[in-house]
Image (cartoon, grey):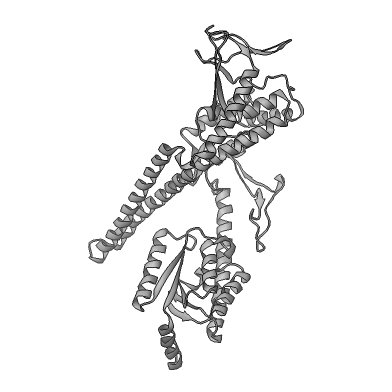
Amino acid sequence: MKSLYALYNFEKIKKVIKRVAIYGRKSRGELDEDLKKHLLLMREICEKYNWTYVEYNEIGSGDSIEDRVKIKELLQDVKEGLYDAVMVMDFDRLGRGSGTDQDTILRTFKISDTLIITANPFQILDPNDERDEETMEFKGFLARREYKMITKRLSTGKKLGLRLGRWSNGPAPFGYVYNPELKKLVPHPENAEIYRKLIIEEFLNGKSTYDIAWKLNQMKIPSPRNGLWSPNTVNRLLKSEVHLGHIVANKTEGVRTDSPNKKPFKKKPKEEWIIVKNCHTPLKTEEEHMKILHIMESKKSHTNGGNINPLSGLVKCFNCGKTLTIQKEENGTFLKKCQNCGKTKGGDIELVTEAIFDTVHLLKNHLAKINAEEVNNIEKENILKKIQKLEEEYERHERAIERIEEAYENGLYSIEKVRRKTKERQERLLEIEEKLREEKKKLEAFSIVGNEERIKRIDNFLKEIKNTTDGRKLNMIYKSIIDNIIWKRTDLYEVKITVNFL
């Protein structure tokens, strides 16, 4: 029981509080619904005592201050003395990472003379009061202990799940989709076929990674990141052991971002990898995989030289669409008359090269002038509509959960029925959240094929062309940005060349 002196100070402190910052953050395993309930309670407390408040809600969370955008923003505002107090649901919401983070938080509150209010239980803590400081240090110690235990349990659970063939390595790789019921990867109804027919089989039939990427881009098939395909992306998918039906873990350690409190990122040697076989349906055989690795290794030491023409496979007949033959002669290199329809006359290949560079510079200038938002507006609009529908469905399920709770309060539902119905709705909410994340990633990925990326590709193209004389490499460079080139010549004096970019 609090002493009369403590109660007097408690009431006195409540009177000096006028401006409050509410910091909302989900703990691991909580739903968005939990955060909404926490915020509702904290708002009610502020309104009860007539405190004005500003909310700082952490969307993405992390172990340390460095990984959390809103806590850094809040600490800066606290440092500047903008608030009398900061309210959190529990003390550990401020942070339960390293002791250094705890020291940073408490020092900021002490220097600015800012109070800390916890909503559960309701408590006002003064960092400059010796007793409260001891309480906060003890709470911080317990929070860090709990965090380490949770991290250890999660790590153990992940390793156990791995042994059981469960997928926990992030988004499903291209060709697969994650099945939440099985907790495993299953073949994607469309992308699995693309992986088989257009990547594996094409490579085994002699196509290069450049040719495969070019073909996929021509067919308007989005890459795993919803952008344009590159030879490196194709290369990674060809070598992937996940597509053998295996799960590979423990390939790396540390984090890629610079942080003094974390291990630096590094790749581990293959003998330290954890490989669990036969976890899901394979999309290639062991025999195919070994052939792929053998072909890749042989290509490193054997090249066909630069005999191929830089524009090979790119120039098409305007009439029938067939690829025109390029022939080298004593006085230069020429396009031959169309062997398929006979309606297109040939000509000097240098005319095509000049047309490419003229068109590239015109395109770059055009892209620099227009706004990126004008590109792919129809696709963006479709994604935005999907997001809106999913958000509306999410709200309907949230309202349904509220009605279920009301039905229980009014005696219409038993506790078992409430649990069953609530669980069904919450499972659907999780599915919608996953779909929302996917659609929002697609929306963000538009920048990959937007104007800035196109300009970057053009700049790389111009730079690489200057530094390359090998015909095969030049052909790959042209195919990195060009879909096809239409050649039209029906008489001796007029040539029309159209360059179509990816």
Image quarter (top left, top right, bottom left or bottom right) of the N terminus: bottom left
Q: Is 347 on the left or on the right of 438, as rendered?
A: right
Q: Residue furthest top?
A: 342
Q: x, y percentage for residue 149?
A: 57, 65
Q: Is 235 on the left or on the right of 179, as rendered?
A: right
**Residue 226 visible at all:** no
How many numbered marks does the figure carry?
0
Q: Is residue 115 above or below residue 1?
A: above
Q: x, y percentage for residue 378?
A: 40, 37
Q: Is residue 48 above or below residue 242?
A: below
- Residue placed at 29% from the left, 58% from the top? 417
Q: x, y percentage for residue 437?
A: 46, 48
Image quarter (top left, top right, bottom left or bottom right) of the C terminus: top right
Q: Is 239 on the left or on the right of 80, as rendered?
A: right
Closest to the observer: 417 or 81?
81
Q: x, y percentage for residue 254?
A: 65, 55
Q: Residue furthest right?
A: 301
Closest to the observer: 464 or 362?
362
Q: Is residue 269 above or below residue 492?
A: below
The quarter of the picture where residue 129 lies is bottom right
- Residue placed at 50% from the left, 32% from the top? 221
Q: Is residue 72 above or below residue 325?
A: below
- Residue placed at 43% from the left, 93% from the top? 4
- Residue placed at 62% from the left, 12% from the top? 347
Closest to the observer: 78 or 99?
78
Closest to the observer: 183 or 473?
473
